Image: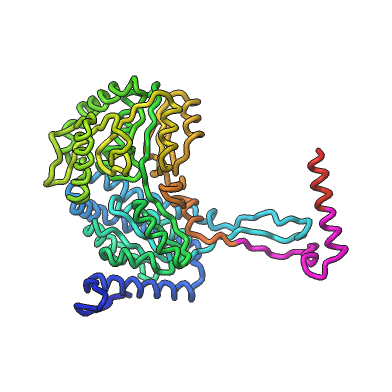
Amino acid sequence: MTYTTTVGPDDGTGRSPKDTAAIAELHAVFAAQRAAVRRSSAPKADQRRRSLMALADVITGHRQQIRDALSADFAVHPEGFADLVEVLGVAGRAVFAAEHLEEWMAPEPRPAGPGLLGTAQADMVYQPKGVIGLISPWNFPFDLSLGPLADMLAAGNRVIIKPSEYTPACSALLREMVAEVFDPEQVAVVTGGLDLAQEFPTLPWDHLLYTGNPEVGRLVARAAAENLVPTTLELGGKCPAIVHTDSVTADTVAQIVGTKLVKSGQMCITVDYCLVPRRDTARFVELVKAHMRERVPGFVSSPDCTGIITERHLQRLIDLVEEAKARGVEVVQVDGSGPDMATRRMPLTLVVDPPADLALMREEIFGPILPIKSYDGVEDAVSYVNHGERPLGLYVFAQNGDVAERILATTSSGGACVNTCAVQGAVPALGFGGIGHSGHGRHHGVDGFREFSNPRGIVRRGQDDLIEVMFPPYGAVLDGVVSSVLGAAEAEGAR
């Protein structure tokens, strides 16, 4: 079954025929999925398991096409990393969900209160929400589309995915792959430009997931609020690495720099900036230089260096560095002589002790630029982090376990790691998401299953209850129940 609409050259809205057709398709598929929800009961565990395994099979079966699409959109994209994250990461999440469906779907017994309800049974039952909208970003076009889809399918939902217009090759392949294994009344992909992106969150979804930046996240949340649609927002932010003086080492630098080089910094949970003890800042910079020289020489010209997604995005990064130079801030270009405009690859660039009003300290960088801020004491580093928006990820490097735990206890973030970075986003069983400015809600594992489920409290009446004391007329029986409860509470308080 397919949903297509033919339009003329001018529909009176100012939209292009392509966008008009895309919006018409979105509404048609949405209506079909809503109708399917109304006429169908929640899918059983075996149906959900089949859908999850079909997802795992289609992603692994298109491994080479995924590599090719990523290279087309990014100019250069490492094939091994594509396999690891965009293929195996998605397949792993789908298989993990399939293996745990029975326990996730099982009703959770809750105490009913025998004093009032006798032998009544109370359960929390997780049922599908219905039709979910999924707006995915360009930086991980398969992982951040089909990964959350695994959670949504595990919860028994129907889903429409709107991928990014910045990755046309990946979006076209995503649409092809989904159509290959799913009826559009279960899962569909709609592609288009800005008009479609603006229309998408205005529909009366049963839930909406958006992954992207906080500015667009506000617009999505505002549009969804018109229909009281619950949202999950994954918004990124300036994720810091706090390096304790006992951890200014080659291993720490390998973790931080290695993470920063992944996707050339185009990752929401990468290290955005480092906080390093002032007396160790120069040594930290030298360790970074040594790491690049010894571990990844010539990285910017290698096939492991991902291209920046567009020329506009690359120019923004260049401008961030130029602003720092113009302000007299120390800038250390670690690898290569400058950006390769043809392949949109940019060398790792350190910016040492930038002032807080620079754009690279106010905005999420999303590129291979690493600011290094000096601090005089751990409390100063914690205070600096806490005076900003709460980040999606926070990374603590400390051999002293007490120091690490103290930093974790006095900061707040969506997720965190100790002596490594970004791994919290790669654990299928660990809920992933932000807090405050970096988003809200969780996906991955049982947390994702519950995020996209309606937790329905159900009471089944038993025997020997006192339910009727809640009904008028009120009198001696109710007074006796209240006195009994208050007396028990007073006796407990006196112990």
Give the position of the N terminus as an image quadrant.
Answer: bottom left
Residue 435: x and y in percent read: 45, 47
Q: Is residue 84 magenta?
A: no
473 and 209: which one is in front? Answer: 473
Residue at 83 percent of width and 58 percent of height? 481
Compared with 153, 329 (above or below) is above
Residue 465 location, quadrant: bottom right
Q: Left or right of 458: which side holds 324?
A: left
Compared with 410, 52 (above or below) is below
Q: Is residue 432 visible?
A: no
Residue at 34 percent of width and 32 percent of height? 274
Q: What stretch is highlighted in magenta?
A: 457-484
Q: Is residue 341 visible?
A: yes
Give the position of the C terminus as an image quadrant.
Answer: top right
Residue 327: x and y in percent read: 22, 34
Compared with 215, 318 (above or below) is above
Residue 225: x and y in percent read: 45, 63
Residue 362 location, quadrant: top left
Residue at 43 percent of width and 69 percent of height? 204
Q: Left or right of 177: which side holds 441?
A: right
Q: Is residue 460 magenta?
A: yes
Residue 243: x and y in percent read: 38, 28
222 and 136: which one is in front? Answer: 222
